[in-house]
Amino acid sequence: MFAAMADGRSEISNFASSADCDSTLRCLGSLGIKIIRSGSNVKVHGGQFISPPSPLDCGNSGTTMRLLAGILAGRQVEAILIGDTSLSTRPMGRVIGPLTEMGAVIDSNDGTAPLTIVGGRPLAGKDHQLKIASAQIKSCLLLAGLGASGTTTVHEPATTRDHTERMLRWFGAEIDTAVPGVISIRGGQTLSARTFIVPGDISSAAFFLVAAACLDGSDLTLKGVGMNPTRTGIVEVLTRAGVDLTISAERNECGEPVADIFIRGSVNILESAPPLLLDGAIIANIIDEIPTLAILGTKLGGGIEIRGANELRVKESDRIRSVVEGLQRMGSIVEEFEDGLRVHPSRLTGATIDSHGDHRIAMAFAVAGLMADGESEILDAECVDVSFPGFFQTLQSVVNA
C-alpha cells in the first residue's frame, strides 16, 4: 500500500504468499497500480489511483479493508470495498465514524461491509481520541490524514503496533511521535519509492515458539523474526513463564528491528510456573497470539488468565468462544469471561476441533494437537491460507527434524 502511494518503483522482498496479501495486491491492481510479482519478490510502480470498474474484494483481510478505506478517502477515490462472509460481519463503523468527521462520505451496511467510498470529497485533518486500542483504526486515520489538509492527530488509549509509523518514515514522510500514545501527520506529503525487506512475522512464529516451549526436549531457532517492541509481548509472556528463550543477532532492517530467536522446551520448567495473569496494556501487543497462549496455559503449573481482551469477540470468529469450546473438547478446564478466559493446567486429549474458518484458531489447535494424547482433527483447516499457506507442512517438517 505504501509503495502504491509512493512516487517511483519500490521493490519488496520476503513478501508473504498469504491470501490476505494476495487480496491487497489484487485491490491495488484494480486501482490502476502496476505490480510485478516473482515468488516472494514484488515490484510496485506507484502512481495515481483510479476508480476501479468493479468492487474491490478484500477477501478475509480486515487490514486491507480498513487501511484502504483511509487511503481512498484521503485521495478522494470512489470505490466499493467488499469482503468474504466473515469480513462482512466485522465492525467497520470504528473507521467510518472518524473518517466521516474528516469529511469523507461512506455508505455501509449498518456499519459493516460493503463500504462505498464516495469520491471527490476532500478531507480535513482532525484530532481523534480513540476509544479502542487498534492499530488498524490508527493506521486508517493516519493514511487518510496523509491526503487531508492540515494535521491529523491520533490519541491511543494504549500503545498498539507501530509498523505504520515506521513505514511512513521509511518512505520519507514526517510524522510526530514525540508524545507516547499521540501520533500526528501533516497532510499533503509525498512518499518516495523504497526497497524493503519484510521481517519474519512474529505472530506466525508464535505457534512454533509455543509448540517448542511445551514439548520437552525441543530445540528450535527461528531466524530473521521481526522484533518490533509493539509486537514482542509473546516473548515477554514466554519469559515470564520460565521458558528457555534467547534473542541473538539483533539488527535493524528498513526501520524495523529484527533478530533470531532460540527456544528450548522443558516441561519441568513449565509445570512449576506460577499463575500468569495477562491484562492491561500488554493485551494490544499480544492480541493475535492469545489463542496460542491459551494452549500454553494448559501446560503451566498455575495456568493462565487473560482479561481485557474483548476485541477477540469481533475477529474472524469469536476467538474467546472458539478457544474455550476447543479446549473443553480436548478435556481442559476453562472458564469463559466476557473479556477473556482462564485456562487451568490440563492434560489434553485428541478431539475434533471446529476452526470456525479462523486461521489463528486452526493453527493454535494444531499446536494443541501436538501435545494431546491421541489424534486430533481440525475442521476447515484450509483457512490457514489466509495468513500462512503451507503452515501444516512447515510444522510437520519441524516436528520431524
Image (spheres, rainbow, N blue to C red):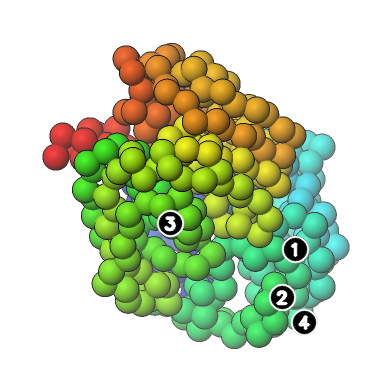
Q: CA distance from mark 3 to mark 4?
A: 44 Å
Most extreme residue toward the left is 401
Q: Amino acid at mark 1?
A: Pro
Most extreme residue toward the front is 272
- Along the line of sight, the residue nearer the viewer: 251 or 88: 251
Place residue 257 in its image quadrant: bottom left
- Along the line of sight, the residue nearer the viewer: 71 or 391: 391
Sequence-first disc among 2 and 1:
1
Number of residues whose C-alpha sits closer than 10 Å to that of mark 3, classed few (under 14), some (14–19) or many (20 or more): few
In the rendering, at what x and y percent does residue 184 appear?
A: 70, 79
- Along the line of sight, the residue nearer the viewer: 3 or 176: 176
- Along the line of sight, the residue nearer the viewer: 48 or 226: 226
Place residue 366 in its image quadrant: top left
In terms of secondary structure, where does tag 4 sit? loop
On residue 150, the disc is: 4
Q: Is residue 376 left or right of residue 1?
A: left
Q: Is residue 352 visible?
A: yes
On residue 157, the disc is: 1
Sequence-first disc among 3 and 4:
4
Task: Point out the frontmost of discs 2 and 4.
Answer: 2
In the rendering, at what x and y percent does residue 282 appear?
A: 60, 57
Reading the image, the residue beneath label 2 is: 182
Reading the image, the residue beneath label 3 is: 239
Number of residues whose C-alpha sits closer than 10 Å to that of mark 4, classed few (under 14), some (14–19) or many (20 or more): some
